[in-house]
């Protein structure tokens, strides 16, 4: 039984990391917790660096070090701790898809500093839109996906003696003069925009050559392209297309350095063929659809933010002050009080209150951001008056409960050749009724203009700290393009493009089909938005309000 290609790539990636962990940055491993992942993680012990585990919520004092408050109080003098980044190590980050942007930036800075660190990101995302932060993914040479892989033997890297010998040979490996240019050209043809990709591929090719005790050659470039460039590809050019002829390279001059080593040139088409062979089935099709990471959910009463500065007080918890946490003095003293007698007996010479690290309690608060529901209503056609009437009633019903749920509402109507913001974000029921008293109706259906207006309102609300959600009410028959032309094909394409932009911005959405029959184009639009699709052909205001509340978790 042949070994799965993912295991073959994983073994080679671990072997190359054992040769040049700092230069290659690390490994992005996408796999949910399973025996398969456990076996690969166990093989990380072969790396020539100590393994240290991080947490997505690790504090700055744990990364960089800082004041050790407990030791300082006990010793009576200032004592500091060394952070995780103070010593060269292989940092293992579980739940890497949940790493906040601040932590991703700090780890990326540590990798750029070439301080001897190597990062292993364990991505446990269940959906394709849950992924590692781009700042980290760009700096890690290898990406291995083990989802759906059957249990197999762990990918053992090369023995430590061979890896140590390869590390000794690495500095002396000579690369062909045009190797980096070839890799950069292939990366460009694969749609890879980052300049780090060909540089990492060159490092991988050097490590591969060092493993085999030779100068870099075609086999090393091919292996590097499969490992580094293939997982990053976004387009796949036809390998049979004729490339413009290149001028023959000039003969090297005498006395040139290692960059002038002579080696057989590997045509770009061979590298591209190697990349195509390394791609899993359907990978590029999924990439073409885009993997926009959706931010902050659309359920409940807005996004919940837990912190230690403001909001509703939450029960304190055990923890150490690290610059981001505030000590709950009363809770700390309450935790230390029952142990004072025992501590005085254990240290009879000490006087005063004795506080240990286990006594520290930190403050916690929970704050909910205001939720904004942006109604995007189709005001075109003969059914416009009915749609607007029911939308008006639904808005009034939802707004009547806004005071308890901290909801705001906004209303956008699109008809003719554009969209109009009829009701800016508000919680005022009186103002809403006044604005909704006379809504225009009739005309064509500029669906793309309505989605564009919703995106602008949502982004403006998010800058003010609100959590926006878009609710689209239409029959789906878009016939006006974004530039005002009466072109159904262009109108549909513009609507899909704006739906992708709305999804990429992280704005949750809900699509309600108000037509007499379900419209297939609207179901497709909802799929692009990653939004629920609700066909409600004869919904009145109360049913519409109940459907919106249920779908949004309200």
Image: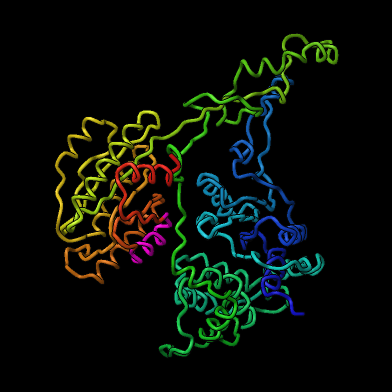
The picture places residue 147, in percent across and down from the top left corner, at 64, 64
In front of the other: 136 or 5? 5
Q: Residue at x 71, y 59 (%)?
A: 37
Furthest residue in direction top, as rendered: 351
Q: Residue at x 67, y 71 (%)?
A: 6
- Seen in the image, is 136 located left or right of residue 391? right
Residue 76 appearing in the image: yes
In front of the other: 193 or 403? 403
The picture places residue 80, in percent across and down from the top left corner, at 67, 31
The picture places residue 295, in percent across and down from the top left corner, at 45, 48
Q: Quadrant of the C terminus?
A: top left
Q: Quadrant of residue 330?
A: top right
- Seen in the image, is 167 located left or right of residue 394? right
In front of the other: 225 or 378? 378
Residue 524 drawn in magenta? yes
- Seen in the image, is 505 located left or right of residue 433? right
Vertical arrangement, residue 370 with respect to residue 415, above or below: above
Q: Residue at x 30, y 39 (%)?
A: 409
The picture places residue 402, in percent across and down from the top left corner, at 35, 32
Vertical arrangement, residue 416 with respect to residue 395, above or below: below
Look at the image and give the residue range highlighted in magenta: 519-532
In front of the other: 159 or 237? 237
Residue 289 drawn in magenta? no
Residue 71 appearing in the image: no
């Amino acid at each position: 039984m042949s070994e799965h290609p993912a295991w073959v790539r994983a073994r080679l990636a671990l072997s190359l990391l054992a040769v040049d962990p700092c230069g290659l940055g690390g490994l992005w491993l996408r796999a949910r917790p399973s025996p398969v992942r456990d076996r690969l993680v166990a093989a990380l012990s072969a790396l020539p660096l100590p393994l240290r585990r991080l947490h997505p919520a690790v504090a700055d004092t744990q990364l960089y070090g800082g004041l050790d408050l407990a030791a300082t109080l006990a010793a009576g003098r200032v004592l500091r701790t060394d952070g995780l980044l103070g010593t060269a190590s292989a940092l293992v980050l579980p739940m890497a898809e949940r790493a906040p942007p601040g932590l991703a930036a700090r780890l990326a800075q540590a990798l750029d500093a070439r301080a001897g660190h190597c990062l292993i990101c364990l991505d446990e995302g269940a959906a394709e839109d849950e992924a590692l932060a781009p700042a980290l993914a760009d700096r890690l040479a290898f990406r291995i996906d083990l989802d759906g892989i059957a249990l197999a033997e762990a990918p053992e890297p090369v023995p430590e003696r061979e890896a140590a010998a390869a590390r000794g040979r690495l500095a002396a490996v000579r690369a062909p003069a045009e190797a980096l240019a070839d890799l950069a050209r292939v990366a460009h043809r694969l749609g890879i925009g980052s300049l780090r990709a060909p540089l990492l591929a060159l490092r991988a090719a050097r490590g591969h050559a060092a493993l085999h005790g030779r100068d870099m050659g075609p086999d090393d470039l091919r292996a590097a392209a499969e490992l580094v460039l293939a997982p990053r590809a976004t387009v796949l050019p036809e390998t049979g297309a004729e490339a413009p002829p290149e001028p023959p390279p000039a003969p090297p001059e005498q006395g040139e350095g290692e960059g002038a080593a002579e080696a057989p040139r590997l045509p770009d088409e061979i590298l591209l063929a190697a990349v195509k062979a390394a791609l899993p089935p359907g990978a590029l099709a999924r990439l073409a659809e885009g993997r926009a990471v959706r931010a902050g959910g659309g359920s409940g009463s807005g996004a919940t933010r837990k912190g230690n500065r403001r909001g509703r007080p939450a029960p304190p918890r055990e923890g150490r002050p690290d610059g981001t946490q505030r000590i709950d003095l009363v809770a700390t003293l309450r935790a230390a009080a029952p142990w004072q007698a025992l501590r005085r007996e254990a240290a009879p010479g000490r006087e005063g209150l004795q506080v240990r690290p286990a006594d520290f309690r930190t403050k916690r608060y929970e704050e909910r951001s205001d939720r904004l529901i942006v109604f995007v209503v189709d005001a075109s056609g003969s059914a416009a008056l009915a749609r607007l009437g029911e939308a008006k009633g639904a808005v009034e019903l939802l707004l009547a409960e806004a005071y308890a749920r901290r909801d705001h509402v906004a209303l956008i109507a699109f008809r003719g050749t554009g969209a109009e913001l009829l009701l800016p974000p508000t919680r005022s029921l009186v103002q809403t009724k006044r604005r909704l008293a006379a809504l225009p109706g009739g005309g064509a259906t500029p669906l793309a203009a309505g989605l564009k207006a919703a995106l602008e309102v949502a982004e403006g609300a998010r800058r003010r700290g609100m959590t926006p959600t878009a609710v689209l009410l239409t029959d789906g028959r878009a016939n006006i393009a974004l530039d005002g032309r009466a072109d159904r094909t262009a109108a549909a394409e513009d609507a899909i493009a704006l739906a992708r932009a709305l999804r990429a911005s992280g704005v949750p959405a809900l699509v309600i089909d108000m037509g007499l029959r379900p419209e297939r184009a609207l179901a497709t639009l909802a799929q692009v938005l990653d939004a629920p699709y609700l066909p409600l052909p004869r919904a009145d205001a109360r049913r519409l309000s109940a459907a919106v509340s249920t779908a949004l978790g309200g």
